[in-house]
Image (cartoon, rainbow, N blue to C red):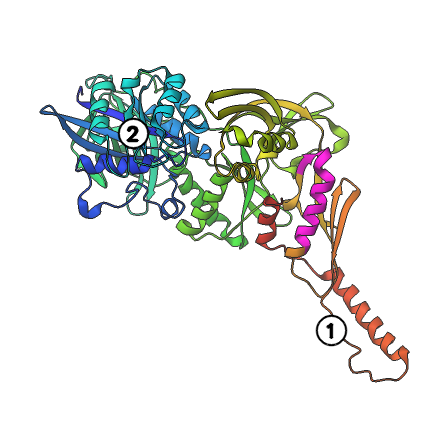
Amino acid sequence: MKNIRNFCIIAHIDHGKSTLADRLLEYTNTVAAKDMEAQVLDNMDLERERGITIKSHAIQMDYVLNGEHYTLNLIDTPGHVDFSYEVSRSIAACEGALLIVDASQGVQAQTISNLYMAIDNDLEIIPVINKVDLDSAKPEEVEDEIIDLIGCDRSEIIRASGKTGIGIPEILQAIVERVPAPKGDPDAPLQALIFDSVFNPFRGIIAYYKIVNGTIRTNDFVKFVSTGKEYHADEIGVLKLDMAPRKELSAGNVGYIISGIKTSREVRVGDTITHVNHPCENSIEGFQEVKPMVFAGVYPIETEEFENLRSSLEKLQLNDASLTFAPESSAALGFGFRCGFLGLLHMEIIQERLGREFDMDVITTVPNVSYRVYDKRGTMTEVHNPSGLPDTTLIERIEEPYIRASIITAADFIGPIMTLCLGKRGELIKQDYISGNRIELTFDLPLGEIVIDFYDKLKSISKGYASFDYHIHDYRESKLVKLDVLLNGESVDALSTLTHVDNAVSFGRRMCEKLKELIPRQQFDIAIQAAIGAKIIARETIKAVRKDVTAKCYGGDVSRKRKLLEKQKAGKKRMKQIGRVEVPQKAFLAVLKLD
């Protein structure tokens, strides 16, 4: 056990984690040259197309130092703020972390938040400056930033390049020398922490775990503590590029278990595996429940696909424990699910994965956050959906979630960023100079304001340089109103939103204009209205598609033309009474991108 090292790679988005992991795998000959490709651990098509890591990936490497053989378990983690739950789970399964910082960009917001997460879990931190081969690299400046951040010696910082392979031997040596071996007793009762799981259509559910105490062998009779279910361990093993079966695994190791589990509810991330005959006294602590930030309705386009959507979401939840969902129904869209996501990118990825991996065509409603609504009696209810809001006469007050946001940027962009944040009802808490030209701004912002397009706007006004990280801070009372969209007098509940009183009129007007562009013309006039309660605040009309009925009239009395037009008008009126307006999926998505 003294020769096992469990470590993860943490960094801000796009600082070169996956490329550095490639070099480590190449140097330790874990991946054969013929199987080697860029971002070898990113095995999802989506990850390759977008160039981002969505899932944490575990892999075992063998390494020899001074004639002694070591087993290194590496977990490559995502960098984007929406996947921070993946990072927290990876950190729980490790004793050390490589902190990667880009030599040209320096310390960024997500670097700091992932670092604090690792420090909270008592991980040994190995700082690495990546991309030192770039012409724009500033290794000395970045070293100063890292020293300010974690207070290490300059000699502890390793300079490396994931592209050219500089510094890879030093990193591997540092992992062996600095990261502590896992603690645990191989002879104690079995205690293994599940940190991830995947669904395999042929073999059932495969759970990934880290053994804290005890030993597990093939065909052992094991029990999952929180669900109380018991299984035979048909196959256990370690995670190489593919799964590599083993006869037994003991404390400190990271591995997988296949036991023919078919239903996804029986495996929970954060659960403990133990033996049925010699169970451990208590389960492993340290897994917080995930708190979704953004809620949206997900509905199948064909209503009979509802059960298929449920099973697809359950399989997806195995692979992404930060997804939460509960059934709901909508007058406009039928039966579907109210899903909780960690952010907009997370929502986009889930929607894309439903389409690619499960062939599900879905409509996603306007995303919103959860509000606390207090009625006149003082009872508090959490509302995730504007249609769940009680009658306005019964509401005492509404509280909305506020976040504490940290934005790191070059000093040149302070003006536009402050304008953006203050325009989103933000409040500047403090500003600190990190080094030279870089500054950290701390804001309190309403989560509902940043949920839709804040991140995109921040990136565009700062030319891609500002980095952003946040956590939920508190709930504050706000003047919020429910904005409804009516088509021909009928409310479309999927388009209704909760918004601040000051923004309601301009938002309603923009929404009507956008819908006018997107809803196709019908045989009758369509009135698009935005309303707060009974008060209409904006209106647009989509004119009917009309045949020129007077084309056949040459000359003659005008009453002939009028008669034909009146007849047409009566037909349009009758059509309007029975006609239904289909809202295209593009319209739901366009509301997210209102500038």
Q: Could you tell me which secondary element the residue under label 1 belongs to?
A: loop
Front residue of 563 and 455: 455
Q: Residues within 10 Å of mark 1 (few under 14, many from 20)?
A: few
Residue 176 is labelled as: none
Q: Quadrant of residue 47?
A: top left
Horizontally, is 366 left or right of 261 in the view? right
Task: Using residue 403 as the reference point, say whether residue 91 is left or right of it.
Answer: left
Upstream in sequence: badge 1 or badge 2: 2
Look at label 2 and name its amino acid. Tyr
Residue 175 visible within the image = yes
Residue 547: give its label.
1
Label 2: state its secondary structure: strand
* Position of 103 relative to 156 (above/below): below
Q: Percent position (x, y) of residue 381? A: 63, 27
Instruction: Name the residue nearer the viewer: 19 or 452.
Output: 19
Choose mark 1 or mark 2, whichever is in front.
1
Q: Which residue is mark 2?
A: 209
The answer to if 458 sits in the magenta stretch is no
Q: Main secondary structure of the magenta part?
A: helix
Image coordinates for residue 534, horizontal then vertical, percent: 79, 42
Residue type pointed to by label 1: Lys
Question: Which quarter of the rendering shows the C terminus?
Answer: top right
Q: Which residues are magenta?
A: 498-516
Residue 491 visible in the shown view: no
Q: Hey, which quadrant is residue 252 in on the image? A: top left
Whether residue 555 is situated above or below residue 184 in the rendered picture: below
Residue 313 % position (x, y):
45, 43
Residues at marks 1 and 2, CA–CA distance in whole angstroms = 68 Å
| The N terminus, quarter of image | top left
